[in-house]
Amino acid sequence: MQTGICLRIYLSESDSIGSAPALEAILGLCQKAGLLGVSVLRGVEGLGKHGVHSSSFIELASGLPLIIEVIDRNEKIQHALPIIQEHLPSALIITWPVQLIQGITE
């Protein structure tokens, strides 16, 4: 087993970085940084600083919550984190240690 880090970024579908959707930009940054375990989860509903975001039929909008979760080795996450933070200064970003049982290879 190896020790790694789980990095989780909370976004909205409507967030952007420059002219690109934040989701696409962050995935590009993760790819450039060589991060291996990246998943995007789309929320059905959420409550944040801008109120309730829902996937109800009336509100099929682009404001649903997104979670980008990255699991990789500590050094790779620590290298990518300042770059991600620079592009998302107001996003909620959290990390916690994980045990990598299998699946992460160079």
Image (cartoon, rainbow, N blue to C red):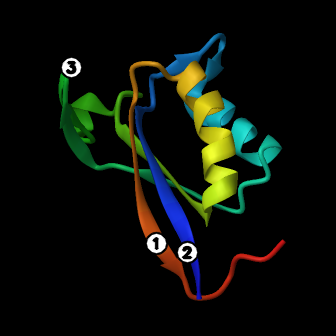
Q: Is residue 4 above or below residue 34?
A: below
In the foreground, 26 or 81: 81
Q: Residue at x 57, y 88 (%)?
A: 101
Q: Give the residue at mark 3.
A: 50
Q: Quadrant of the C terminus?
A: bottom right
Circles 3 and 2: CB distance less than 8 Å?
no
Q: Residue at x 44, y 65 (%)?
A: 97
Task: Give percent across and percent down for residue 52.
Answer: 16, 31
Q: Is residue 20 left or right of residue 90?
A: right
Q: Amino acid at mark 2?
A: Thr
Task: Give percent across and percent down for residue 47.
Answer: 16, 36
Q: Amino acid at mark 3?
A: His
Q: Residue at x 63, y 35 (%)?
A: 26
Label 1: how many residues lie within 10 Å, few (<14), some (14-19) or many (20+)? some
Q: Give the residue at mark 2.
A: 3
The CA span between labels 2 and 1 is 6 Å
Nearer the observer, disc 3 or disc 2? Answer: 2
Label 3: how many residues lie within 10 Å, few (<14), some (14-19) or many (20+)? few
Q: Under tag 2, what secondary structure?
A: strand
Q: Is residue 102 above or below residue 34?
A: below
**For marks 3 and 2 on the same chain, the one whose residue lies earlier in the sequence:** 2
Q: Under tag 1, what secondary structure?
A: strand
Q: Under tag 3, what secondary structure?
A: loop
Q: Quadrant of residue 29?
A: top right
Q: Quadrant of residue 104?
A: bottom right
The CA span between labels 3 and 2 is 36 Å
In the foreground, 46 or 81: 81
In the foreground, 88 or 4: 4
Q: Give the residue at mark 1.
A: 98
Q: Amino acid at mark 1?
A: Val
